[in-house]
Image (tube, rainbow, N blue to C red):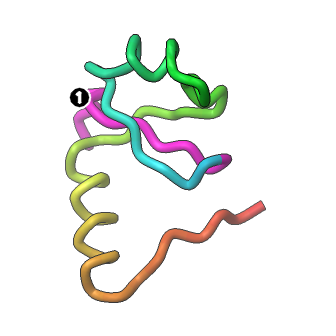
Amino acid sequence: MVKFMQNYFYSAQTNGFYISSLKSIYETSINGWPEDAMPISDEFYQELIDGQSCGKFIKRVA
C-alpha cells in the first residue's frame, strides 16, 4: 500500500509539482495554486523525478 504524505502535489494543467508546505505562498502568487493539484506519494514523486533524469518526460493523458 502506498502511503500518501501529501508533501507533494502534481498539476496536469501546469505539468508541475508543488510542495504542500508552500501552498500559502503559491496561493498569494500571481499564478496561484492550481485547481487540479492532486496529492502524490513521496515514492511516486521520486519515481517521476528519477525518470526525468533518465530522459523520460511526463505526458498529460486525456
Disc count in the image? 1
* Quadrant housing the N terminus: top left
The residue singled out by tag 1 in the image is: 5
- Nearer to us in this view, 42 or 30: 30
- Residue pictured at 41% horizontal, 36% vertical: 9
Q: Is residue 60 positioned above or below 53 on the image?
A: above
Position above or below: 28 against 26: above
Label 1 sits on a secondary structure element that is loop
Q: Quadrant of residue 55?
A: bottom left
Numbered range of the magenta stretch: 1-13
The answer to whether residue 58 is magenta is no
- For the residue marked with disc 1, what is the amino acid? Met
Q: Residues within 10 Å of mark 1 (few under 14, many from 20)?
A: few
Residue drawn 26% across the image and 30% down it: 7
Return the residue found at the far front: 30
Query: Which of the image's four quarters has the C terminus?
Result: bottom right
30 sits to left or right of 1: right
Q: Is residue 1 visible?
A: no
Magenta highlight on residue 6 = yes
Location of residue 40 (image quadrant): top left
Residue 2 location, x and y as percent? 26, 42
Residue 47 on image: x %, y %: 26, 65
Q: Is residue 49 visible?
A: yes
Residue occupying the point 47% across, 43% down: 10
- On the rendered structure, is 6 left or right of 27? left
